[in-house]
Image: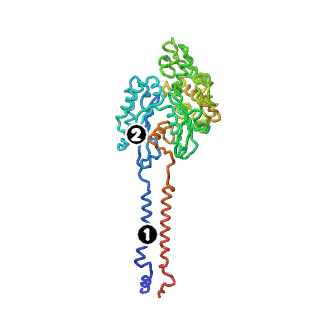
């Protein structure tokens, strides 16, 4: 027993100093790892919000976006959290009763009030952008346009958000911001991937926007927009055709067919058996066609469908000018357009019409698309109504025309062919957010996309913690080995008898 006691007394590991140093070393290592983990652990996410109202020609929609509040310079990923379609037509339709334009927005704004946390209300920017419908109203009656905006602004200012104003977007802005939205949501900007062109079709205008290596803006400076995003420069071609949205294009085709003021027209763009009495003054109540109203026409005309795709396409082509071009190449109406390049995303009415017609799959050959449209347009009106009982008759009646118009616009207008037509992707949403100009508009106004690529940590969080842990363990092992001179030698262990 005395020998064992002597051995313990001579063993340096049993000295108080060694024990104290060992304990301190272990505590230091544990503290280092704990602090690293706690300091860098993911925290509960806090968000900021932005609200954009898209006041289009046929309707208004409200969108709420959110992004992480802790990101430096508000560079967090922006996502759509709510979309609300305003009841009733677009605000331009309330020219004779402007106060109704403001009142129509209340229901969706109340939803926004509930969705955005109260503590964020006062710092949440609220924007309203009006597009082609208000552009047309401003051309036709600027006083009425001003009164509509006054009513809208009064309604928006009653809510607790940070109202940033209501304005009419130019066609160039609408096209450019749609391009930003599509490529931002697809992560093509931050990752420096090939960008996707944007094809937007509304009720009163249509936009085409894409990056082309053959376009530097010198041929048509009005169609050039330059962006510097995430450290990359983009020279964007964009053009907006006012009066070539699907609703105004329909007016233009009807105007072509009624220019002599007949009492009846046989329209190949509507189904056989379709018939409706329409008012001349209503048809020509738009700046897009008002100067073409026939003199001495009766008050109404009988609109009768014949359902013939080929003849419909011939009627549609008459609203375009394909013969004159003062540039090296044009789309239509003497507008310069560079050679198409890269993939394209087609959204808004492009998607909704082609989705109804079950033609969003662009792997279907273009020839098959036209064959299916031909069969659909030739379907009797009564049969179409039986097949789609839940669709409003006004919209249902126009799908033959709208599908024909889209194919004609893409192929004859923008020069898509059977070879590059599959490059088009018809899209409604990208990663849960609606495709359209609103997100790009907000990103631009809030500087959410930096001009230069933001710096990022050299290591992800998990990698960082792993390396710190390994280094800490290595230091502990080295500390143990540093005490090697104090280790007891086996040869010196006393023999126990």
In the image, residue 47 sits, relative to residue 224, either above or below, namely below
Q: How is the image coloured?
A: rainbow
Camera-nearest residue between 66 and 337: 337
Q: Residue 400 occupies which quadrant of the picture?
A: top right
**C-alpha gap between disc 1 and disc 2:** 52 Å
Closest to the observer: 497 or 270? Answer: 270
Neighbourhood count class around disc 2 (C-alpha, 10 Å): few under 14, some 14–19, many 20 upward:
many
Quadrant of the drawing holding the N terminus: bottom left
Q: Is residue 45 visible?
A: yes
- Please say whether residue 385 is visible from this viewpoint: no
Q: Nearer the viewer, residue 5 or 386?
A: 5
Q: Helix or strand or loop: what does disc 2 sit on? A: strand
Query: Where's residue 443, x and y in %?
Result: 47, 41
Q: Give the mark, 1 or 2, whose residue is nearer the N terminus.
A: 1
Q: Which mark identifies residue 26? A: 1
Q: Nearer the viewer, mark 1 or mark 2?
A: 2
Residue 306, percent from left and from top: 58, 20
The foreground one among 306 and 98 is: 98
Q: Is residue 212 left or right of residue 66?
A: right
Kindly check if marks 1 and 2 are in contact, taking CB atoms under 8 A apart as contact: no
- Residue that appears at 44% across and 59% down: 37
Q: Residue furthest bottom?
A: 497
Tell me residue 330's x, y (percent): 61, 30
- The image shows residue 376, relative to residue 444, as above or below, that is above
* Numbered-mark total: 2
Q: Which residue is mark 2?
A: 125
């Amino acid at each position: 027993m005395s020998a064992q006691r002597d051995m313990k007394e001579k063993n340096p590991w049993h000295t108080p100093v060694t024990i104290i140093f060992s304990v301190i070393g272990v505590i230091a290592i544990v503290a280092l790892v704990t602090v690293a983990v706690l300091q860098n652990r993911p925290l509960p996410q806090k968000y900021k919000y932005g609200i954009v109202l898209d006041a289009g020609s046929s309707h208004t929609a409200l969108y709420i976006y959110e992004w992480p509040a802790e990101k430096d310079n508000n560079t967090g990923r922006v996502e759509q959290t709510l979309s609300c379609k305003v009841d009733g037509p677009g605000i331009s339709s309330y020219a004779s009763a402007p106060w109704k334009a403001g009142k129509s927005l209340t229901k969706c704004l109340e939803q926004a009030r509930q969705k955005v946390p109260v503590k964020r209300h006062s710092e949440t920017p609220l924007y309203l952008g009006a597009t082609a419908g208000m552009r047309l109203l401003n051309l036709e009656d600027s006083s009425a346009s001003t009164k509509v905006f006054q009513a809208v602004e009064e309604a928006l200012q009653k809510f607790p958000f940070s109202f940033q104003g209501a304005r009419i977007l130019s066609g160039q802005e609408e096209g450019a911001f749609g391009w930003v939205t599509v490529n931002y949501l697809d992560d093509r900007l931050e990752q420096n991937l090939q960008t996707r062109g944007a094809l937007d079709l509304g009720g009163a205008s249509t936009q085409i926007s894409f990056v082309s290596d053959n376009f530097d803006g010198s041929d048509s400076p009005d169609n050039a927009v330059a962006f510097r995003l995430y450290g990359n420069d983009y020279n964007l071609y964009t053009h907006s055709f006012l009066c070539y949205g699907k609703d105004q294009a329909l007016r233009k085709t009807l105007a072509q067919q009624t220019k002599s003021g007949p009492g009846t027209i046989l329209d190949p763009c509507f189904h056989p058996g379709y018939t409706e009495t329409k008012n001349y003054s209503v048809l020509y109540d738009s700046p897009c066609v008002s100067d073409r109203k026939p003199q001495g026409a009766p008050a109404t005309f009988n609109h009768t469908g014949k359902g013939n795709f080929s003849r419909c396409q011939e009627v549609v082509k008459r609203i375009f000018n394909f013969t004159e071009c003062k540039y090296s190449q044009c789309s239509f109406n003497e507008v310069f357009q560079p050679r198409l390049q890269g993939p394209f995303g087609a959204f808004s009415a492009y998607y909704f019409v082609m989705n109804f017609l079950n033609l969003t799959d662009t792997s279907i050959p273009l020839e098959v698309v036209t064959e299916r449209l031909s069969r659909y347009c030739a379907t009797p009106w009564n049969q179409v109504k039986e097949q789609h009982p839940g669709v409003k008759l006004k919209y249902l009646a126009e799908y033959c025309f709208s599908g024909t118009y889209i194919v004609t616009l893409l192929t004859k207008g923008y020069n898509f062919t059977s070879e590059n037509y599959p490059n088009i992707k018809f899209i409604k949403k990208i990663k849960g957010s609606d495709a359209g100009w609103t997100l790009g508009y907000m990103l631009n106004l809030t500087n959410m996309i930096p001009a230069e690529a933001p710096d990022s940590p050299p290591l992800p969080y998990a990698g960082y913690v792993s390396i710190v842990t390994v280094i800490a363990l290595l230091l502990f092992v080295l500390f143990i080995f540093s005490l090697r001179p104090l280790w007891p030698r086996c040869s010196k262990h006393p023999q126990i008898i």
